[in-house]
Structure formats: structure tokens, C-alpha cells
């Protein structure tokens, strides 16, 4: 459990302690923008690999216990999580690394960006929250809560960086969108247009979701479907 805690601190520190801080600016001056991104990407891969490995070998100390009653709800919620992650990764967005220039385009707020300006991060947040609730042990609490806190804080950090760098262009974009999925739509600042998302993105998301259900027992040793039936 000590190693998992250290890995979680390192994982969070490499993101929240560098991105959006004066340290990032210093590293960019030393390495250049591309050099910084390469080093940061490598460090992030090391951090997540260590976190995952530490989670696998950590002892399973019960907290509230496995909530089998929530398994059906977990299966349902994982589908929108996959939709947000996959569609978010395949949709051009000014919140992605190096894509700030998209803010200069007209009608940039389309598709999944109408739902949330951080679809990938919100998908990971939903995934982490579901697993945190269903897996009632201390290792899962450390692992999934660190992921959840990081992606939520990361969304705020990205917003702050874009606002500082892009000024009014970001203000206009942010006014039409929201971090929390569907919040801007509910408040009347936008509308949901499913046709803009692209059918292939939805099919890809559903296909990957079903594939993960099938391979989940082999990859993680637990069947999310078997726990119900």
C-alpha cells in the first residue's frame, strides 16, 4: 500500500505540479515547446505505468466492500464513459494539447463539445467514479480517487491556461460550453445536436465498450457481467 500511495503522489505531482505552473514555463525555456512535450509525455507514461503496476500488487483491504447491487448501474454508466472518452479523443478541440488555434475558427463548438468542452477528461472522471464506488477496498480508493481528482483538477487547469493565453477567444468559447456534461445545454447556452458527433464515433465507442466487457476478465481478472449473473 505504501508503494501505491507513493505512485499516486508521483502521478498527481507530475501533472498538477508541472502543467500550468511556473515550473512548466521554466522547462519550456530550457527544452523548447516540443522538447518539453516529449519529456512530459514520457514522464506521464512512467507515472501511469507505475500507478497501474502498484495497484495490481497492492493488498485488497476492504473499506465498504464490493457493492454488487450497483453492478448493473455501473455497466450502464460505463457506456457514456466510453462515449465521452472515444468521441473526445477523435473530435478536434481547442482544449487538446497544441490545438488552441481552433479557437480562431467559426463554429468551433460542435458535436461533443456542445455537451462538455472536456469530453475525454469527463469520461475518465465518470469511469474512475464508477469503479471507486463499486470496488470497496483501500487500494481502489487510492487508485481511482487519484485519477478522479487529477482529471477534474486538470480540466480547471486547462481552462486557466487557455484563458491566460487566448483571452477573448477563450471567453467566447467557454461561454458556450461547460466542464460538467450537459450543463451548458441545461442552462440554455447551447443545444444538443447528435448528428454533429458522427455515427462512426458512436459505433467505435460502442464497439470498444463491448470489447472491453468481453476482455475484462482476461485483462483484469474480474468479469463485470459475471458479477451480476
Image (cartoon, helix red, strand yellow):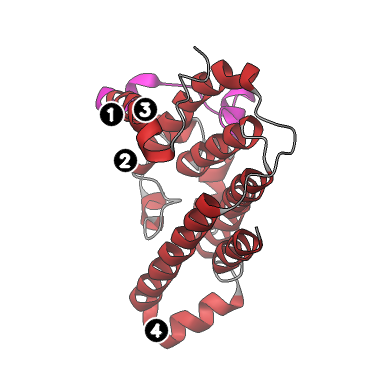
Residue drawn 39% across the image and 32% down it? 216
Query: In what element is the residue under mark 2?
Result: helix
Asked if marks 2 and 3 touch (Cβ < 8 Å), the reply is no
Asked if marks 1 and 4 touch (Cβ < 8 Å), the reply is no
C-alpha gap between disc 2 and disc 1: 10 Å
Position of residue 83 relative to residue 173, above or below, is above
Q: Choose between 159 and 121: the one closer to the eye.
A: 121
Pointer 1 residue: 204
Asked if marks 2 and 1 touch (Cβ < 8 Å), the reply is yes
Residue 10 lies in the magenta-colored region: no
Pointer 4 residue: 31
C-alpha gap between disc 1 and disc 4: 37 Å
Res 144 seen here: yes
Q: Choose between 183 and 221: the one closer to the eye.
A: 221
Q: Quadrant of residue 40?
A: bottom left
Residue drawn 46% across the image and 31% down it? 222
Pointer 3 residue: 209
Q: Position of residue 66 (x, y in %)?
A: 65, 29
Asked if marks 4 and 2 touch (Cβ < 8 Å), the reply is no
**Quadrant location, the N terminus:** bottom right
Task: Check the image and name the residue furthest to the left.
Answer: 200
Q: Position of residue 107 (x, y in %)?
A: 38, 37
Label 3 vs 4, first from the N-terminus? 4
Query: Mark 2 against mark 1, which lies toward the viewer?
Result: 1
Position of residue 179 relative to residue 146, above or below, is above
Res 108 seen here: no
Badge 2, how many Cα within 10 Å: few under 14, some, many 20+? few
Task: Check the image and name the residue furthest to the top.
Answer: 229
Instruction: Identify the magenta region.
Output: 180-202
Amino acid at each position: 500500500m505504501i508503494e501505491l500511495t507513493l505512485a499516486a503522489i508521483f502521478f498527481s505531482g507530475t501533472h498538477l505540479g508541472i502543467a500550468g505552473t511556473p515550473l512548466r514555463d521554466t522547462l519550456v525555456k530550457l527544452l523548447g515547446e516540443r522538447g518539453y512535450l516529449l519529456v512530459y509525455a514520457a514522464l506521464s507514461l512512467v507515472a501511469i505505468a507505475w500507478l497501474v503496476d502498484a495497484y495490481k500488487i497492492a493488498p485488497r483491504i476492504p473499506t465498504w466492500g464490493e457493492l454488487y447491487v450497483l453492478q448493473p448501474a455501473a455497466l450502464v454508466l460505463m457506456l457514456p464513459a466510453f462515449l465521452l472518452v472515444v468521441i473526445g479523443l477523435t473530435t478536434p478541440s481547442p482544449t487538446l494539447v497544441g490545438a488552441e488555434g481552433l479557437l480562431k475558427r467559426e463554429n468551433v463548438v460542435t458535436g461533443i463539445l456542445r455537451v462538455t468542452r472536456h469530453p475525454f477528461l469527463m469520461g475518465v472522471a465518470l469511469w474512475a467514479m464508477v469503479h471507486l464506488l463499486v470496488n470497496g477496498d483501500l487500494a481502489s480508493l487510492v487508485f481511482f480517487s487519484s485519477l478522479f481528482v487529477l482529471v477534474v483538477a486538470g480540466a480547471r487547469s486547462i481552462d486557466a491556461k487557455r484563458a491566460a493565453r487566448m483571452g477573448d477567444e477563450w471567453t467566447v468559447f467557454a461561454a458556450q460550453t461547460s466542464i460538467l456534461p450537459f450543463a451548458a445545454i441545461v442552462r440554455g447556452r447551447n443545444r444538443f445536436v447528435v448528428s454533429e458527433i458522427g455515427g462512426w464515433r458512436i459505433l467505435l465507442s460502442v464497439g470498444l465498450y463491448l470489447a472491453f466487457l468481453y476482455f475484462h476478465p482476461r485483462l483484469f481478472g474480474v468479469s463485470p457481467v459475471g458479477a451480476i449473473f
